[in-house]
Amino acid sequence: MIEKMKGLIKQKDMCVLATAFDNRPHCSLMAYVTDDDCGEFYMATGRETTKYKNLTANPQVSLLIDTREEHAGDLRPETRALTVSGVFEPIADEDRRRGIQTRLLGRHPHLRGLMEKPDAEILCVRVLSFLLLDGVSDAHYLEI
């Protein structure tokens, strides 16, 4: 089942990032890349955004990756949705940060303007668990 989960992660490159602060949830559509094992997700944002402020106050996050675009109309019951629970971890090492930025720009060149801003930040989310909903009721949970 883990390979099916990782396959969905690698097939897609956009997710919904859910953060929270003071019992107020906030969702953001995000472009991402992962490490080779899908144990970490990397995204870019500005330090002045609500999501970044939430992450620095509460590092617990949830990501949603799904196949709704491929499963419209009569195919809707075949939609898969992967919920990734994780924790935000700042990236202190500058060489690692540059490597991740290169990977992000390789997959998402439209992020160049954002990453060139002085307040740009690379986010790292370390995966804690996966929950794959395959169709309407077939659920698979895996702690990492």
Image (spheres, helix red, strand yellow):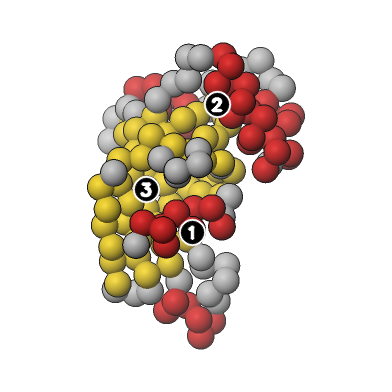
Numbered-mark total: 3
- Element carrying mark 1: helix
| SS assignment at label 2 | strand
The residue under label 3 is 84
* Circles 2, 1 touching at the beta carbon (< 8 Å): no
Quarter of the image for the N terminus: give it.
bottom left
Write down the quadrant of residue 6 in the picture.
bottom left
Which x, y percent locates residue 120?
Answer: 61, 22
Judging by the rendered image, the residue that carries numbered circle 2 is 122
Is residue 92 in view?
yes
Q: Nearer the viewer, mark 3 or mark 1?
A: 1
* Residue position for label 1: 8
Question: Is 104 rendered above or below residue 46?
Answer: below
Q: CA distance from mark 3 to mark 1?
A: 12 Å
Tell me the amino acid under the disc marked 2: Ile
Mark 2 or mark 1: which comes first in sequence?
Answer: 1
Instruction: State the image quarter where residue 132 is shown.
Output: bottom left
Foreground disc of the pair 2, 1: 1
Front residue of this view, candidates 25 and 15: 15
Would you say 78 lies left or right of 25 here? right
What's the amino acid at mark 3? Val
Which residue shows up at 28% across the image and 66% down it?
Answer: 139
Q: Residue at x 66, y 15 (%)?
A: 118
Mark 1: give few (<14), some (14-19) or many (20+) Cα within 10 Å: some
Q: Is residue 6 above or below residue 28?
A: below
| Mark with earlier residue (3, 2) | 3
- Disc 3 vs disc 2: Cβ atoms closer than 8 Å? no
Q: Position of residue 37 (x, y in %)?
A: 45, 43
* C-alpha separation, residue under disc 3 versus residue under disc 2: 18 Å
The correct choice, above or below, for 79 with respect to 50 in the image is below
Residue lying at 34% horizontally and 28% vertically, measured from the top left: 59
